[in-house]
Image (cartoon, helix red, strand yellow):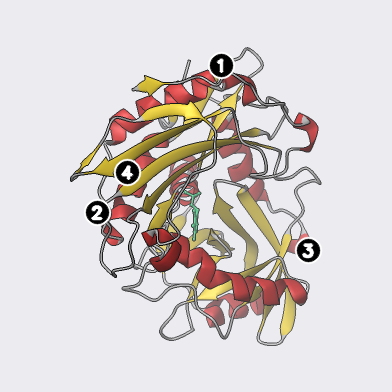
Amino acid sequence: MKVTLTTQKREKPDFAKLGFGRYFTDHMLVMEYNDGAWQEPEIIPYNDFRLSPATTVLHYGQGIFDGLKAYKNAEGKITLFRPYDNFNRINNSARRLCMPPIDVNKMVECLKELIRIDADWIPTAPGTSLYIRPTMIGADPQLGVHPAHHYLFYIILSPVGSYYAGGLKPTKIMVEEQYVRAPIGGTGEAKCMGNYAASLLAGELANKKGYDQVLWLDGKEHKYVEEVGSMNMFFVMDGVVRTPALVGSILPGITRDSVIKVCKKAGIPVEECRISEDEVLEALERGTLSEAFGSGTAAVISPVGVLHAKGRDHIINNNEMGKITSFLYDKITGIQYGRLPDEFGWIVKVN
Ligand SMILES: *Cc1c(COP(=O)(O)O)cnc(C)c1O
């Protein structure tokens, strides 16, 4: 891999006010796909791209991304959480959008090198991390509708603040009755750009009504719960942790998988199944739905305090974070930050 270091390091932001995805490190990784093969990856100074206005991704959305995090502890040790799973998922997303697969092991090694070069950008305050955004775009400078012949794969790094800077406050969500995120057979399983564009309107309308996220129902019958915003969804019903099964329209979250594995190991009953909206409402009425939360890399675990469905607000667990939810949050973040032993083999050392 060719490495070109910047001659002008950029001024660092105030690490106490990072927010999410607003600042980027000094370098990035880029790799081009030409003549039917990925070319040698390169690390170069972080910079803007020059793209033809006709570029494939800008018209037809042939683009995918992923998201993972690196952590640095007080001794300067840097680790990644389950990076091979993310890079394998990139290849699954790529297949769905007719894009070429990358070499997973090689790319994880390249990512480690990039992180070591920009190690001084990784914040160390509690809850902070380095967010990593691998992206792949179709890059032909022409308008024909077909899979591109040229692709660009790149990785950018962004120091991010604690998702819970204002405390771990449960969110308010509402069931989305009109719009759907993804039908079975669509691109819901792929982390592709268009899924996000398609979800914005519902999210905006929910925000206007005072809710943080929408709870998506399935695209066919509008009956089964699928995801919450851009997180996977969990309910604790009758003491069983339940999450919608990966039926084809749901993004296979790595945090979701971690939650399932942690539950299994801790002896907490966990189930992947179809969960109907009616079943959720019945359990709320009967008082057997004790906790609800979303899972994803950015927030890790996000408790739900209010669920709006069929015309009214339902309060979950007194609008407080529940026992199982906090156990899972502490366990997964504990492993990520190295406070707890890596009993699942999820941690990959960078330095
Ligand atoms: C990325 C994503 C998730 C969460 O996946 P993680 O691997 O846990 O970060 C869930 N749902 C959607 C739609 C996503 O795009």
Amino acid under disc 3: Asn
Q: Quadrant for the N terminus, please.
A: top left
What residue appears at the point 62 percent right and 21 percent down from the top-left corner?
8
Q: Is residue 130 visible?
A: yes
* Pointers 1 and 4 in contact (C-beta within 8 Å): no
Disc 3 secondary structure class? helix
User: According to the image, label 4 marks what residue?
Assistant: 88
User: According to the image, label 1 marks what residue?
Assistant: 77
Disc on the earlier residue, 1 or 2: 1
Per the model, the C-alpha gap separating discs 4 and 2 is 22 Å
Disc 4 secondary structure class? helix
Q: Position of residue 24 (x, y in %)?
A: 61, 36
Per the model, the C-alpha gap separating discs 1 and 2 is 40 Å
Give the left or right position of residue 105, taking residue 243 as reference: left
Amino acid under disc 1: Lys
Disc on the earlier residue, 1 or 4: 1
User: According to the image, label 3 marks what residue?
Assistant: 318
